Each structure stands twice: as structure tokens, then as C-alpha cells.
Image (spheres, rainbow, N blue to C red):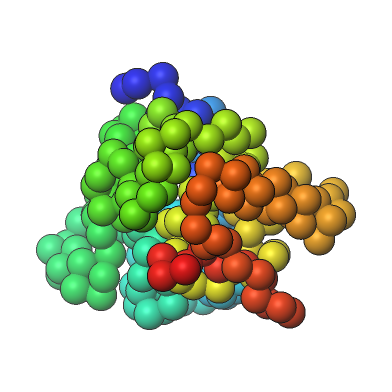
Amino acid sequence: MRTGSARYLSAVKVLLIEDEPELRRSIRTYLQGEGFVVDSANDFPTAHEKTTQYIYDAVLVDITLPKGNGLDVVRELRAKHPTTGIIIISAKGSLDDKVRGLDLGADDYLPKPFHLPELVARLRALIRRKRFDGNTAIELDELRIVPEDKLVEVHGQRVDLTIMQFDLLLFLVANKDRVLSRTAIVEHVWGDMAERLDHDGFLYSHMKNLRKKLLEKGCRDRIQTVYGLGYRLSTRA
Ligand code: CA
């Protein structure tokens, strides 16, 4: 594991859907220790609410849940957020559940009990695959980003960004051509800190500086403000 990737993964947001309190705690603590931002849900209604409200990089979902079924979470998520990675974590070792889960659009299936380092390895591989089609560099004509090295170039010239500007750009690129609400961006990039921020002012100034730095190097004006809604990074600009 290269040192750069842990930093890059620090902005990765995961939803853990698990009703066993002990297991939920241990997975959550372990993932946080590995630098993930972790949100959790202990039943179906909470899982439904969170996946409706926020955009996650990955969701870990148990199948047998209070007040519902994890497979329904998979079905809903796949329809709403095709770029979210889904790993089913389930004690139900039946082949049926596995096949149904993968049929519904889950990306991976990890039977319980499992080792936490294996979960993390699969999570990292999945996120890399999902976000950037498995490529180490993302290229949009003049703009090139190497997430693991925190490198951004425009026409081959390095752009110096702060970590927050870099995370913002990566989130916009991962969701290119889609409008992202201010709330979704703030929640994603700043995680739990978001509650204490003056959202609009904070995001506005970071976005303005990011845009300015890219334009200065000759990047096309790709970051668009969508009035009343949020921001979008356009591949066609
Ligand atoms: Ca369960």
C-alpha cells in the first residue's frame, strides 16, 4: 500500500448498515482507524433515510435487518446512485442470497464472520474501481488527476491545491456531469465537521479558489454553479 492512498482515502465516505451493535461498533472503529468517514444505520428505515439523503462512496449492508431486508436497500441504491459501491456482509451463507444480491447490483459479497483487514482491502479495491474505472489517473482532455499522488495537472502543468480543494475536485470529477447539492458536497468533503460550518460561505470560497487555480493554468471553465441547486463539473465545457 502506497502512502499516498491512505491520504486519498481519507475523504471516502462509507455507510455501514448492520443491526448487531457489537459488530457495528467494531467495524466502525476499525474503518475509522483506516481513515474512512463512517456513518451507520441499524435498521431498514434508517438505511433508507440515509441513502436517500446522502451520497456514499460505498455501502456495507447486512441482509437480515429489523423492519426490512438488506436486499431492498441494494435494489434502491442501485437505482438511485449507480456509482456507489455495495458490499453485502451477511451471515446468511446461502448461495441464493448471494446470487440475488449480486443480481440486484451489489458489487461484492463477504460472508460473516470475516477478517476486518479483508473487508478494508475489498472496500479499497471496490472504491478505486467504482470511482475511476480502475484507472490510476483520470483524464478529461487538458485536466489530469492522479488520486493516489494527490496530483492535479492542466496541460501537463502541476496545479497546487490544498487538501480540501483536492477533495472537492475529486468528488466533482467522480460525479462528473451531475449536479451535486451544496449539502451533499459539504457532507461528503467535510463529514461530521459539516454541522459546525457556515456551509454556503465556506463552500463558496473553497470552490471559488479551486476554480481560479484551474483557470489560471488554462483549464476550461468546467466547474459550473447551478443556481439554487449546487455545482456541476462538466466534461463538455
Ligand atoms: Ca442482521
Does residue 225 sit above or below 189 in this rendering?
below
Question: Where is residue 8 drawn, in percent x and y?
Answer: 47, 34
Q: Which residue is drawn at 45% across and 56% down?
A: 173
Relative placement, left or right, of 126 versus 192 is left
Q: Residue at x 21, y 67 (%)?
A: 102
Q: Which residue is drawn at 73% across and 79% down?
A: 228
Total tally of numbered discs in the picture: 0
Q: Residue at x 41, y 65 (%)?
A: 235
In the foreground, 138 or 64: 138
In the foreground, 124 or 237: 237
Does residue 227 sit above or below 109 in this rendering?
below
Does residue 212 sit above or below 118 in this rendering?
below
Question: Where is residue 30 drawn, in percent x and y?
Answer: 49, 32
- Res 84 quadrant in image: bottom left
Does residue 116 sit above or below 173 in this rendering?
above
Q: Quadrant of the N terminus?
A: top left
Question: Where is residue 191 drawn, in percent x and y?
Answer: 66, 48
Relative placement, left or right, of 129 versus 190 is left
Whether residue 224 can be seen here = yes
Whether residue 62 can be seen here = no
Question: Where is residue 184 drawn, in percent x and y?
Answer: 63, 63
In the foreground, 76 or 211: 211
